[in-house]
Image (cartoon, rainbow, N blue to C red):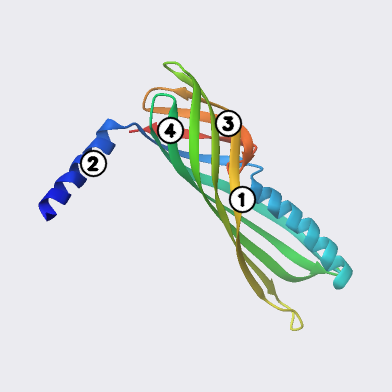
Amino acid sequence: MKQFSLLLFMIFFINCSFGQKHQISPGFGVLTTNAFLDIFSNVGTNIVGGVLDGSKLENKRYVGDFRISYAYDISNWFSMGMTLSYAKASGDYYKSGEFVGDQRINYYSVGGDATFYYMKKTHIKMYGLIGAGASFVDKEDRSVVPEGKNTDNSFAYFNFQISPFGIAAGGERIGAFAEFGFGYRGLFSTGLYVRL
């Protein structure tokens, strides 16, 4: 029975490896849902902090969203896969012009993607993409003054992607892509693809 199971697994693996088209795509997105969350969080932090104790979050930095995606072709016009992305944000707290602490946030996102190709030519493809998943946020606030407090907060939220327009150009194996949409990939996203 073990040998039969192993044989079935090997047949399935070989079929998936050579019978399907696999694509790996490193990329970068601008103005993702994580970036919007960070912007709204900063505004709220400054309003609440300003009212409660006069503190402000300044020198805000946001780096990301970097991602890696994997997809496999179900048919000539449809593929499925997943995306993993990472971004980080940081900032400094000031009270009456004096540095009193800092903030560090890490954003991790994972989502399942479905891609629909509405035009496929030899060196250019146009597509739409939808996806759903979750973002996981790790936030640390650190104080450098004795009366301050340190807080760690982690939470997750539902995230999605809707990209009605994407274009991929290049060869059969290697090329580049750009897409417009909204969600965990960003309002604008670009990167490279490698097909195996």
The residue pinned by badge 4 equals 79
In front: mark 2 or mark 3? Answer: 2
Residue reaching furthest to the right: 51
Q: Secondary structure at mark 4?
A: strand
Residue type for callout 3: Glu
> Upstream in the sequence, badge 2 or badge 1?
2
Identify the residue at horizontal 61%, vertical 64% (top origin): 155
Q: Nearer the viewer, residue 172 or 81?
A: 81
Mark carried by residue 63: 1
Left or right of 147 on screen, residue 165: left
Left or right of 38 on screen, residue 20: left
Residue type for callout 1: Val
> Upstream in the sequence, badge 1 or badge 3?
1
The residue pinned by badge 2 equals 12
Q: Is residue 196 above or below residue 139?
A: above
> Upstream in the sequence, badge 4 or badge 3?
4
Left or right of 196 on screen, residue 127: right
> Upstream in the sequence, badge 4 or badge 1?
1
